[in-house]
Amino acid sequence: MVDITHKSNTLRIATAQAIVKVSKQDTIEAIKNDTVPKGNVFAMSKAAGFLGVKKTPELLPDCHPMPIEFTGIEYEIEELEITVKVTVKTQVF
């Protein structure tokens, strides 16, 4: 095994983006107005996103667990598209 005790901490930032397209303006309005029958779409997707970040080493082969310092999930609605941006930060050496 290689001795890495002399290495300094490094900030690592990972970003991902997805675009969700819907077919009707009614769907966008229901999301904006929090009237979707199954609940708040953004709150549920944030919870799922945070869980996905925490469980990544369990889900992906050869993915080593790292201490997560920050996870940010943002949404932007434009016409019939919702852009989801996820940022994860960690300090490792």
Image (cartoon, rainbow, N blue to C red):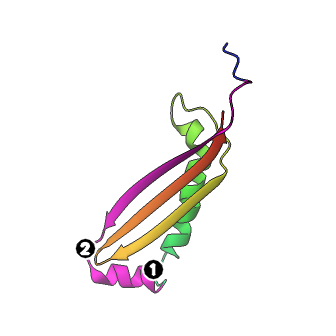
Magenta-colored stretch includes residue 16:
yes
In the figure, residue 3 lies in which quadrant? top right
Of the residues tagged 2 and 1, which is closer to the observer? 2
Could you tell me residue 9's position as x and y percent? 68, 37
Rendered image: mark on residue 64: none
Locate residue 67 relative to residue 34 in the image: left or right.
right
Could you tell me residue 69's position as x and y percent? 67, 51
Q: Say which residue label 1 marks.
A: 36
Give the magenta-colored segment's residue range: 5-33
In the figure, residue 49 lies in which quadrant? bottom right
Rendered image: mark on residue 23: 2
Secondary structure beneath label 1: loop
Give me the residue at 49% from left, 83% from top.
34
Seen as rendered, the residue at the extreme top is 1
| Whole-number angstrom distance, CA of label 2 to CA of label 1 | 15 Å
Secondary structure beneath label 2: loop
The amino acid sitting under disc 1 is Val
Sequence-wise, which precedes: disc 2 or disc 1? Answer: 2
| Circle 2 crowding by C-alpha within 10 Å: few under 14, some 14–19, many from 20 | few
In the figure, residue 29 lies in which quadrant? bottom left
Could you tell me residue 33's position as x and y percent? 46, 87
- Which quadrant is the C terminus positioned in? top right
The amino acid sitting under disc 2 is Ser
Locate residue 46 relative to residue 18 in the image: left or right.
right
Locate residue 90 relative to residue 82 in the image: left or right.
right
